[in-house]
Image (cartoon, helix red, strand yellow):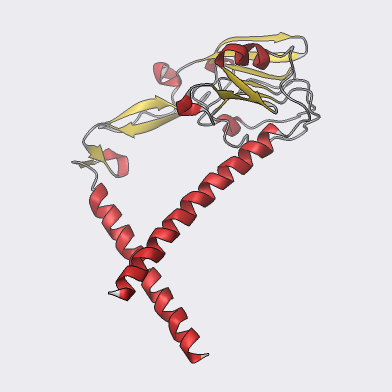
Amino acid sequence: MTASVTASTVCSCSVFIVLFSVYVDSQDTDAQLCQMCQGTVRQDSPVWDFCLTKGHIRGRCCFGNNTSNVDTIIGLDLANCSISHVEHLYNSSTSFIIDLSNNPISNLSDFIFQGFNHLTQLLLPSKLECPGGNASWEKVEVKNNARICEGQKNICNQTAQMPWDCPENSFCSPYGPGFFECSCLHNFHGYKCMRQGEFPIAKVLGILTGSTVVVSSLLWFTQRRKAKNT
C-alpha cells in the first residue's frame, strides 16, 4: 500500500515538474525575446500604434489585453537593434505584427515564420524578400528603407501554387506565409488520415500513465535498496 501511494506521489510530482519546467522555459524565452533590444517598443513604430488598442507593452513585446491571452505575444518590435542573424523568434508565432526593419540582416529563412498564421504585417530590411514571396501577401511595398509585407494570403485558396494536395479524409490549413498543413477530418486520424474512428486518447493516456508509474516504482525501489545497503 505504501509503495503504491509513494509511486503515485512520484508520478504526480514528475508530471508537475515537467509542466513547471515547460512554463518556466516559456517565460524565459519570452523574456529573452522581449529583451533582445534595450528599452521598450518605440513610440513611432507600427507596433506601438497597434498595441495602443490591442494590448500592453513589456520590453520590445506587445502582449494581449484579454485575460485568455494575457501572456500571449501579439506584436514584436526589434527594429534598429543591430541584429545581423535571426534563427528563430521563440514564442511569437501568435504575433499579428513584427518589425525587423533597420537591421543588418543579410539572409532570413522562410521557415522562421512557419506557423505564424496570425501575422498580418511584417517589416523587414528593404533588401530582403517577404517570406513565401510576394504571392503570399496582399500588398508588398518598400517605404523608408523597409520592405512592408501586408495581408498574409491563405495558400490553401491558391491550389494552383500548392506543390501537392492533402490526402483523402483531410483538409488544408494555412501554416504561415507560403506554408500549409493537412489536418484530418473529424472521425479520422493516423498516417495520412487513413484510420477512421475516434483517436484512442484514454488508451494512450492509460499506457503513458502506466509506463510512468512502472518506471517511477523501479526508480524508487532501486534508490531505496541503495539507501539500505549504505
Drawn side of residue 141 relative to residue 95, left or right: right
* Rendered view: 14 above or below 153: below
In x, y percent, where is residue 216?
39, 69
* Rendered view: 151 above or below 3: above
Q: Residue at x 74, y 22 (%)?
A: 79
Relative depth, front residue between 206 and 140: 206
Drawn side of residue 121 relative to residue 146, left or right: left
Relative depth, front residue between 94 and 192: 94
In x, y percent, where is residue 142?
71, 10
Report if residue 188 is visible in the image.
yes
Relative depth, front residue between 47 and 189: 47
Q: Residue at x 60, y 37 (%)?
A: 90
In x, y percent, where is residue 131?
60, 24
Residue at the far bottom in the pictured view: 229
* Rendered view: 4 above or below 189: below
Drawn side of residue 138 relative to residue 33, left or right: left
Residue at the far left in the pictured view: 197
Report if residue 179 is visible in the image.
no
Q: Quadrant of residue 225?
A: bottom left
Count of numbered labels shown in the rendering: 0
